[in-house]
């Protein structure tokens, strides 16, 4: 048997160092940790993942959201409602064993409050654009891909 290509080895029915792409027009971008794609017209992008966020990071992110809401140029009733949900999410995150479903529900309610306000108050649109990326980071900790939608 000929010498295998560098990065490709077969031994005792074990194949290592191989990327398999089946189908037509596949594009794979990868780093450490490979992905296999099966089908037609697939595109896969894989980047080095950022450090996972911790519970402490989540509490800090939720505090940041509270500050953004407090500083927003919104009617007080809207600010109070959005802040109430953000504070409840943060309070849940601070517990020794946080209930992620409670945090998720409060963040979704906060998001609904801000997006509903954005239909009539221009400042809410700007607030939502600022809050959303921060809230989505919390969503990664919650283990959900779509926190809002």
Image (cartoon, rainbow, N blue to C red):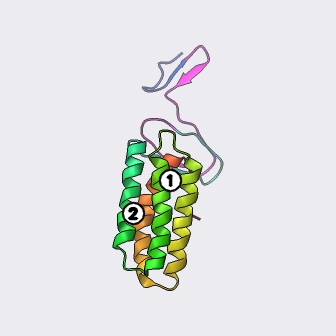
Q: Quadrant of the N terminus?
A: top right
> Do the numbered discs 2 and 1 sit on residues whose CB atoms are within 8 Å?
no
Mark 2 residue element: helix
Residue at screen point 55% across, 48% down? 100
Residue sticking out furthest to the bottom = 120
Residue at screen point 42% across, 66% down? 131
CA gap, disc 2 and disc 1:
16 Å
Q: Earlier in the sequence, mark 2 or mark 1?
A: 2
In front of the other: 148 or 91 = 91
Q: Determine which residue is flagged by label 1.
A: 139
- Asked if residue 93 lies in the magenta stretch, the reply is no
Q: Count neighbours of disc 1 (C-alpha within 10 A) and say few if under 14, some if 14 to 19, many if 20 or more.
A: many
| For residue 126, above or below residue 10 | below
Residue at screen point 56% across, 62% down? 108
How many callouts does the rendering have? 2
* Residue 41 picture location, percent across and down: 60, 54
Q: Quadrant of residue 55?
A: top left
- The secondary structure that most of the magenta stretch takes on is loop
* Residue 88 picture location, percent across and down: 49, 57
Residue at screen point 42% across, 49% down? 58
Mark 1 residue element: helix
Q: Which residues are magenta?
A: 11-34
Q: Determine which residue is flagged by label 2.
A: 66
* Residue 102 picture location, percent across and down: 57, 52
Q: Is residue 112 left or right of residue 71?
A: right
Q: Say if residue 116 shows up in the picture.
A: yes
Residue 97's label in the rendered image is: none
Q: Say if residue 53 shows up in the picture.
A: no
| For residue 17, above or below residue 22 | above
Q: Quadrant of residue 122?
A: bottom left
- Asked if residue 21 lies in the magenta stretch, the reply is yes
Residue sticking out furthest to the right = 39
């Amino acid at each position: 048997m000929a010498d295998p290509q560098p990065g490709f080895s077969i031994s005792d029915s074990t194949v290592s160092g191989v990327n398999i792409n089946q189908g037509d027009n596949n594009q794979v971008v990868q780093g450490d940790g490979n992905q296999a794609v099966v089908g037609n017209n697939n595109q896969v992008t894989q980047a080095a993942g950022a450090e996972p966020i911790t519970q402490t990071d989540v509490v800090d992110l939720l505090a940041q959201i509270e500050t953004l809401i407090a500083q927003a140029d919104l009617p007080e009733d809207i600010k109070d409602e959005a802040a109430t949900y953000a504070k409840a999410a943060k309070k849940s995150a601070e517990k020794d064993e946080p209930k992620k479903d409670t945090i998720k529900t409060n963040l979704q309610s906060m998001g609904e409050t801000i997006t509903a306000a954005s239909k009539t108050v221009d400042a809410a649109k700007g607030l939502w654009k600022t809050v959303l990326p921060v809230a989505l980071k919390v969503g990664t900790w919650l283990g959900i891909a779509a926190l809002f939608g």
